Image (cartoon, rainbow, N blue to C red):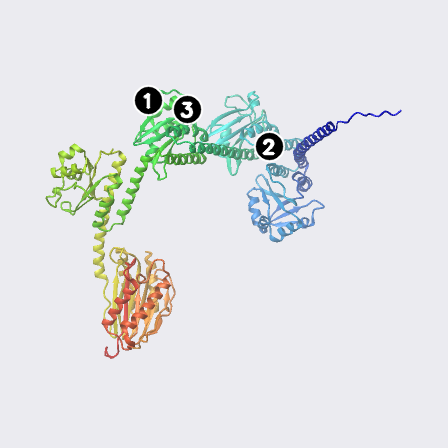
Amino acid sequence: MQVEDARPVNHDLSWFLLWIMAVIVAAAGVVGLRSARYDQERRLTNATISRTAALAQRLARAATVDEVADVIGDHVPALLGADITSFGEVDGDVVRLHHRSGTDPAVADLTELPLDGIPTLVREVDAGRTVLLRDPQEWRRALPGGIADRLLDAGARVAAVLPLEAPGRGVVATIGILWWRPPELDERTTATLDTVRELCEQSLSRAALTDRVSERASALADLAERLAGVDTVAEVARTATSGAARVVGARTVDIGVTDVDRGVMRLHRDPRALGSDEPVVSELALDADTAQTAAARTGAPDLQPRPVDDPDGSPTGARAAFPLRADERVVGSICWSWDRPVAFDPDTVNELTTVAEITAQSIRRAQLIEDQAADARRNRALAELAQGLAARSETEDIAGFLTESVMRPLGAAYSVVGVIDGDRIVRRYSESLVRTGLTALGQDQRSVGIGGPTPDAEAARTASTVIVTDRTQADDRYPTMIGVWDQLGVQSGAAVPVKDRNGRVVAVISVLWDHPTVIRPDVSDTLATVAGMVGQTLERTGLVDELRRSVLRNQRLADFARLLADVRSVDEIRKRVRSDGAAPVGAAVIDMVLLADGRTVAGTERTDGPGLLTDGTGASAATLVEPARECLRQREMVTLGASAIRARLPAPMVEELSSTGIVLVAYLPLVAPDGAELGVVALGWPGPPDLTPTVVAKLRTVAELCSQALQRTRLREAEHRLVVSLQERVVHPVPDAPGLLIAQRYLPAAEQVGMGGDWFEGVELGAGRFAVIIGDIAGHGINAVADMVELRAIIGSMLRSGTPLEEVYPRVAALVQQGGRGLTATSCTAVFDTSDDTVRYVSAGHLPPVLARPDGSVELLEQGRQPLLGVTGSIVAPGVAPFGPGSSLVLYTDGIVERRREPIDVSIENLRVATAELVRTHLHPGARIAAPTQDDVERFTDALLRSCLGERSTDDDVALVVVTRADRIATGR
């Protein structure tokens, strides 16, 4: 009988069970995937360790170079995931390559590499550096192009070349590793490369390795692997102290890490030597008399093969201390101790050296990692500081936040923030300082004058960072702070000025450490960054409004100084003092009296307001009011308050001052550097200003600026008179010449003193020949005049002595160079020959003359060009041009054509066009062919000047000579 279950089926429950099973399966898959990845990473790590150990063991058993090469070819590729590994033996001038059987023919066919064909690679390898070739450019830089392309075409993508060094012999072999697929060159790969190199170097340094050496090689590989996996100096030291002893069979190992800036060594002791299970760390001075510090100081190993005494007097066995050298600097030392004598044979020394090198590289790598971590922490703290400052707008809030936040990025124990208030610093302390309960902080140190003997006061005065690195330095510089620092345990500190955007110090941040410190670049940069952020915050929050006014006065003082620097006469000084002298010190009125000879009042100048200096009874120094005479006698500022004004000034002046509200007057002497009295400047204020040291300094600066301007002006006037006198003596007119009409003009530069270096001269050469020379010496003033006189005399004497025209300038250039004065000049000489109606010319770097003919044609004469005077040049044939009756030649210097922002070619073309137009209107009007008269030439010259210069003042001297060929009949020819 068949029984049927007629109960209804719950399908929802079925689907729910199926969903649960799916989730379980998915979770199991995720767990399995993660487990697989972990197993894969573990297998990779175990495989690397295993292969490194296997390589070390095989190398330990290799007895010949060929066996070493075979081991490298068989085992290194698997260790590094490479495709090909070759061993290269340095033999004289070539590297002989050993390849394993079955190597790709593109590589196997390379059996020798000449060293002179791979200079870049040789330099790197000779320096003991591992060379990595990661892109085609690096391949072609390191290898000959044919070889590089051959390997790249075969599929090679990355290569590594490991130098193998032998003690006392340098690099004796190399290992070349090729990857067809670019590997991940991470820390593990780099550490493995270093391990491979070290292991192979050891294998090459001995003919056969004993079982003992094989064990040590394995220990070395193990140590290298362990060191490659740590990333702090403490972990490196702990790993080395526990593992380096087994490599050489030592009893204990100590690791010392130097801090050169502080002059100390942090010594990580082997805890086994001290019967401890925990790391033991102490500090030694670098100049201490120990094996560890000696190795670090000298950079040389210290080997004691026989028993020596420990510092505590207990006997011990042999000892070896090696410097830890990385990146071409010593980072510390490693010291082994044995309980027996040790013969430090080459093999042992090689092992010690290898351990030292691996440890040094690990320490340096860890230091870099720690530095990066410290930078990250510092940057994070600075970011938090910036965010906190951005959210605050009250003085107390900002100062309180700063005192706590500024310590974190600097690792300081205490901090103080002082805000400048007038001539005092008002301090706010960090909570760590407040918690000390030091009563002197509140009683004596809450506010200090800027002139006080404290680091923050000095930083405020000098606007520069003040640093004390230890207590000896601190006590010597700031003895008044010894008591406070003793109670706080302060050992070092820094005070950093905070400046607003105009450079004015508005606050000082002080940080204090409880240990000696060295302000390294990272700390210095952090201090500067903090100061910059705080300065911006104070500026933003308006805490420096009063300081802004002071900054404005400073700016006005700077503007006043700049304006006075540009004045060129006493009248200009008076105008500048009247318009700009009172603003830098906030005065309402300024008055100045100048003394012409120490006795006569040369003139007064004051702003609109009452007079402050003379009683109006005469024009001598005796008419100065008594306080003004006193300041001249004492060479010091004299100030009068309201009562002193009434007592010491004439009644009419007192009445006038009273009506304008002036209640304070300051008198300052104007004195030349030689002590001569130049005058007096007086300033008045309507309210009683606070004559702080800053204001007094500004007053003295105003007086000093006025004195300097007066002295410069008087010196300039004296030089002007001297140069004008020289000008009258040396600028001679070009003499008349038969058959020639000559007009000349000289205009000094408008912005220069007296005469510059432009000149001209005419020289009679006989036989119907006449020379006109024009030149331009670089510079202005007396030196330019002196150089011009000398050069003019040399050229004139050569022409008069019959020197061929083409040889004149080369000879002059040679003489100038022999003098060694660096004289630079241009010149042009034109020799007019009325016998054959020609002009011959040469130009030494000078602008081309302009030749105008009676038919109206105008051209530039550009032949016969030689280098400017002062530069060696060769002889160049003179240019020759017809110069018949009615022809005119224009010789000029650059002052007539040069214009700012206009190319010189355009300026010369404008001169040529102007010459053509004026020749038609002044020399040959109405197509007149006959030669013009002297008056015509003079008018033409003036018109040419006006056309070229217009109404503008010239920035350079202008010299212009126009020579016109006279009519033959008029000259009697």
Q: Which of the numbered marks, if any, corresponds to residue 308?
A: none
Asked if residue 33 lies left or right of residue 867, the reply is: right
Q: Amino acid at mark 1?
A: Gln
Tell me which numbered mark, 3 or 2, is placed earlier along the sequence: 2
Inter-mark Cα distance, 1 to 2: 55 Å
The quadrant of the picture occupied by the C terminus is bottom left
Within the image, what quadrant is residue 775 found in?
Answer: bottom left
Tag 2 residue: 229
| Residue density around tag 3, few if under 14, some if 14–19, many if 20 or more, within 10 Å | some
Residue 859 against residue 436 in the figure, above or below: below
Determine if residue 383 is in view. Answer: yes
- Above or below residue 848? Residue 404 is above
How far across and how far down the image is residue 140, in percent? 59, 50
Spot occupied by residue 840 in the image (x, y as percentages of width and height): 33, 71
Q: Quadrant of residue 249?
A: top right
Q: State the residue lying farthest toward the left.
A: 617
Instruction: Name the quadrant of the N terminus.
Output: top right
- Contact between marks 3 and 1 (CB within 8 A): the answer is no
Q: Where in the figure is residue 598, as x and y percent of width and height?
A: 15, 45
Q: Which residue is mark 3?
A: 431
Q: Is residue 277 above or below residue 124?
A: above
The dot on residue 443 is: 1
**Would residue 39 appear left or right of 379 to someone viewing this image?**
right
Residue neighbourhood size for the residue with mark 1, other residues' Cα within 10 Å, grouped as few (<14), some (14–19), many (≥20) = few
Residue type at the position of mark 3: Glu
Q: At numbered mark 3, what does the secondary structure look like: helix, strand or loop? A: helix
Position of 764 with respect to 513 (left or right) is: left
Front-most of residues 306 and 82:
82
